[in-house]
């Protein structure tokens, strides 16, 4: 099996996380049905860091989505590579 480039995988995960948080916030601002529960969770997680369902919240949420996605996907790629080497 092929090893993952942990940095690139983490960066892709960070971009994905930022896009998801930004898209959910935009949909909530446009009153698209079904997005309120997701933004309620985002306010719980990121509200301490300044996130809200607003135009500024899109940027703050995208930043924290990038950081969290980078961290989680990076850990996943590192763990995958480590387990791959233990044959």
Image (tube, rainbow, N blue to C red):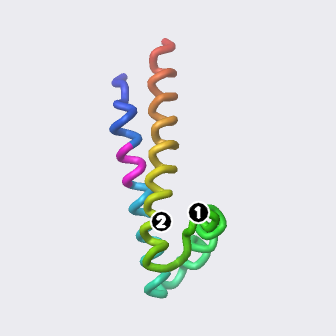
Above or below residue 33? Residue 7 is above
**Toward the viewer: 44 or 2?**
44
Residue at the spot of label 1: 49
Q: Position of residue 87 (x, y in %)?
A: 49, 12
Above or below residue 71? Residue 36 is below
Above or below residue 25? Residue 84 is above
**Toward the viewer: 26 or 33?**
26
Q: Earlier in the sequence, mark 2 or mark 1?
A: 1
Query: Quick check: 15 left or right of 67?
Result: left
**Toward the viewer: 75 or 47?**
47
Q: Position of residue 58 (x, y in %)?
A: 44, 71
Instruction: Determine the residue positioned at 63% across, 62% down.
Output: 45
Residue span colored magenta: 11-15
Query: Quick check: 49 left or right of 56?
Result: right
Q: Is residue 13 magenta?
A: yes
**Toward the viewer: 2 or 74?**
74
Q: Position of residue 38 (x, y in %)?
A: 57, 71
Secondary structure mostly seen in magenta is: helix
Residue at the spot of label 2: 60
Mark 2 nearby-residue class (10 Å; few <14, some 14–19, many ≥20): many
| Cβ atoms at labels 2 and 1 below 8 Å apart | yes
């Amino acid at each position: 099996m092929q090893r993952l480039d942990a940095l690139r995988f983490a960066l892709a995960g960070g971009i994905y996380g930022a896009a998801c948080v930004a898209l959910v916030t935009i949909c909530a601002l446009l009153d698209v049905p079904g997005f309120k529960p997701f933004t309620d969770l985002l306010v719980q997680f990121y509200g301490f860091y300044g996130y809200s369902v607003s135009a500024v919240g899109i940027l703050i949420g995208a930043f924290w989505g990038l950081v969290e996605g980078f961290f989680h996907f990076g850990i996943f790629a590192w763990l995958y590579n480590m387990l791959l080497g233990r044959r």
